[in-house]
Amino acid sequence: VVGPSSDADRGFLAFDLHGEGEYAKKLWVDSPGSQYHPRIAKDHLDQGRHLLQMEGREVFRHAVTRMPESTAAVLAKAGLSLGDLDLLIPHQANLRISEAIQKKLRLRDDQVYNNIMRYGNTTAATIPIALDECRRGGRIKPGMIVVLTAFGSGFLWGSAAVRW
């Protein structure tokens, strides 16, 4: 659980969030959905409409463009630059995406945290799991600038800058 910081010098510094509905069906799940009553029906399951639909090349192309853009934007909103970044925790969709982001931002290996090789893509839990591992393992220290960045279904992406 993330709550307010009692230290005015620590906590969330800025957010950057985007969505592009035009590309929603490049990465999405048709059912269950609010347009259906009931939300999901047996025929939806029989038809596989509850399974993730993805155009992998398009998703990769956008992810390796949008997450670096959002990382730079959130740092700028916080009055910081990439030179101030201590640790980037990207959504763990796949290692190739993380490596491409690292290369595009010119970050060192020790500035990007990856755990996908141990857990795979745990969807919405990838950043919380990675953040917890970094915290418990001492990878994050007080005063460090950490950026959390993600990309996901419905074609949304964003970042949060945190002073730990």
Image (tube, rainbow, N blue to C red):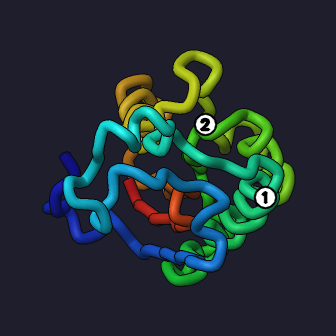
Q: Distance between the residues labelled 1 and 2?
A: 24 Å
Q: In this view, does 10 lie to the left or right of 78?
A: left
For the residue carrying disc 1, how many other residues have a C-alpha within 10 Å: few (<14), some (14-19), or many (20+)?
few
User: Which of the two residues, 147 or 59, is positioned nearer the viewer here?
Assistant: 59
The residue that label 1 is drawn on is 58
The correct choice, above or below, for 121 with respect to 61 in the image is above
**Picture residue at 66% right of the left edge, 48% below the top:** 54
Residue lying at the far front of the rendered structure: 43
Q: What residue type is labelled 2?
A: Tyr
- Which element carries disc 1, helix, strand or loop? helix
- Which element carries disc 2, helix, strand or loop? loop
The correct choice, above or below, for 114 with respect to 54 in the image is above
**Picture residue at 50% right of the left edge, 76% below the top:** 16
Numbered badge on residue 20: none
| Disc nearer the start of the sequence (1/2) | 1
* Residue 133 percent location from the top left of the image: 42, 27
Q: In this view, does 107 lie to the left or right of 149?
A: right
Q: Which amino acid does label 1 sit on?
A: Glu
Whether residue 28 is visible: yes
Q: Is residue 38 left or right of residue 25?
A: left
The correct choice, above or below, for 141 with respect to 59 in the image is above
* In this view, the mark in front (1 or 2): 1
For the residue carrying disc 2, how many other residues have a C-alpha within 10 Å: few (<14), some (14-19), or many (20+)?
many
**Picture residue at 25% right of the left edge, 53% below the top:** 39
* Residue 22 percent location from the top left of the image: 63, 79
**Picture residue at 49% right of the left edge, 79% below the top:** 78
Whether residue 87 is visible: no
Numbered badge on residue 113: 2
Residue 27: which quarter of the image?
bottom right
